[in-house]
Amino acid sequence: MIRDITLGQYYPANSILHKLDPRVKLLATLTFIAALFVAKGWPGYLAATIFLVVIIRLSRVPFSFMVRGLKAIVMILMITVVFNLFLTPGDKILVQVWKLKITDVGLRTAIFMAIRLTYLIVGSSVMTLTTTPNDLTDGLERLMGPLKKLHVPVHEVSMMMSIALRFIPILLEETDKIMKAQIARGADFENGNLIQKAKNLVPLLVPLFISAFRRANDLAMAMEARCYHGGEGRTKMKPLIYARRDYAAYGVVICFLAVIIALRVVL
Amino acid sequence: MSIKLEHVNYIYSPGTAYEIHALKDICLELKDGEFVGLIGHTGSGKSTLVQHLNGLVKATEGRIYFHGEDIYGADYDMRRLRSKVGLVFQYPEHQLFEVDVLSDVCFGPKNQGLSAEEAQERAKAALAMVGLGEEFYYQSPFELSGGQKRRAAIAGVLAMEPEILVLDEPTAGLDPKGRDEILNQIQKLHQEKGISIVLVSHSMEDVARYVQRIIVMNQGEVLFDDVPREVFCHYKELEQVGLAAPQVTYILHALREKGFFVDENATTIEEARDTILDALRSGRQA
Ligand SMILES: Nc1ncnc2c1ncn2[C@@H]1O[C@H](COP(=O)(O)OP(=O)(O)OP(=O)(O)O)[C@@H](O)[C@H]1O
Ligand SMILES: [Mg+2]
């Protein structure tokens, strides 16, 4: 149940996408998201669909994993669709129930909105599923590098991010364990009204916080013991270097963006 | 007849890249009043197995019967099962949360629906059983030493008065003295209260001294299930799966090879001492 959160969960496989430089994947994801908002009309979305399907195929991650991330946004998706469907004014009224009417423009907007959101989540899932959290923050750190000139603590931020990401599965596991231990002592996390439920969480949250602080403390100690002192002069064990396939990937992404823009301009 | 497992299989995260077949076709029967040791190398599935005993994880396949009733039956009362089968987790001290030791130990009995006074009585009795006296009642559980925390956590399960007590590595990370104290207390519970005990451990030495029956697990399967001396006969196989027989077994086998007539099946230090002394005496007489 707790493990259903795919976003930020790496799926190990041996594919070209897994081997790409994280910077490429980050920029490509951003480009893809931008393209989703640039695209207009069926041809644009068709191009995006083809691109996405090919990418998913290349990633060798089972399709069921991709859509798992969608579960989390089902509610948001529904709300967006419903609002767009009923509240968009348009010329032709297709259905009218009391004061609510569905117009042709509303229907179109709703469908495109749903597609956009779905592709957005699936597209970013492809990135997080094929990139280890460490690579991801590495890539981010490099991409943000220029901000250092503006005294933005890029290294520190990315270090915090990678630690946070690393802690997510650990804390999930810990939650699972503590929950089981308290259930074994008769705790009940399912029944009762809202207030009771909140109260019942105390035996879970207190040990969880304590363990989180203990882990954070241990980690800080371990880092200090190994003379960690921030980003200044720090080198990488595996520095990011672009390979030929990375340039090729950039080329593909630029072509994709060009197609989307062309479709928008031409049609 | 008390707990019976039939062809239990358990798979973590089935259908994903992280799929792990943690239990493979386990068939076991744990009888009333037994003191059983569950042994296996790291990752052999001990913790997974014991979490099945009180229904915390549901077997992917197979059936489990408690007193003859199928615990996966439609209207089986899991909460009652959990108060009958007390499970002390690995590192149980991480589950303490109350402001003082006494209220923490009261958590279980209160969940069973007992009144505050009854719960306190049970808690005090349980704390006495694990050797924590009155001076600890109102201390914060977070200010206790590691061993004391461990005892408080065990008391938290004992206070529910289970029929079967399952302990997942209760001595991990304790010093030899703390380890012996806890194990002795568990043995006392078994002898005086007649509670069945399942003791999960890495250490043959610990287990050999206390248990009547040993179940050895390897990679999710039951490798041996017998009385200690029979299990230790297979000390070569045990080594292959990352375990070891007690040191006395090795000494006795070595002596035997040198021509001493010792009983190499002795399992505890005391038995070994006796058989070595016997062998020496008879040797001198011969
Ligand atoms: N929550 C979990 N999710 C996925 N896999 C798990 C989980 N818990 C255990 N496993 C896997 O199941 C297998 C059995 O683990 P288990 O914890 O039962 O071993 P164990 O015998 O208790 O080991 P140890 O002596 O180290 O406590 C291991 O391969 C482990 O990686
Ligand atoms: Mg374990």
Image (spheres, coloured by chain):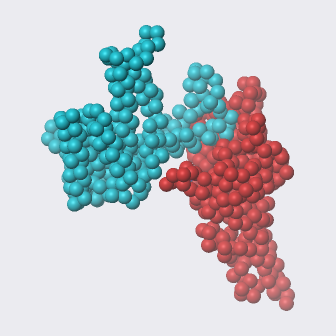
Instruction: Determine whether A144 is above or below B121 in the image.
Output: below
Residue at the spot 44% in from the left edge and 26% down from the top edge: A78
Q: Residue at x 77, y 69 (%)?
A: B229
Q: Nearer the viewer, residue B261 or B273?
A: B261
* A265 left or right, relative to A159: left
Q: Position of residue B203 (x, y in %)?
A: 65, 62
* A148 vs A72, nearest the viewer: A72
> Chain drawn cyan, letter?
A
Q: Residue furthest top?
A: A99
B66 displayed left or right of B61: right
Q: Residue furthest bottom?
A: B286
Vertical arrangement, residue B225 with respect to residue B1, above or below:
below
Answer whether residue B3 is visible to the viewer in this image: yes
Work out whether A83 lies above or below A135: above
Q: Quadrant of the C terminus of chain A?
A: top left
Q: Colour of chain B?
A: red
Residue A119: give x, y in percent of width and height. Answer: 36, 38
In the image: residue B241, left or right of residue B1: left
Does residue B153 appear to the left or right of A150 in the view shown?
right
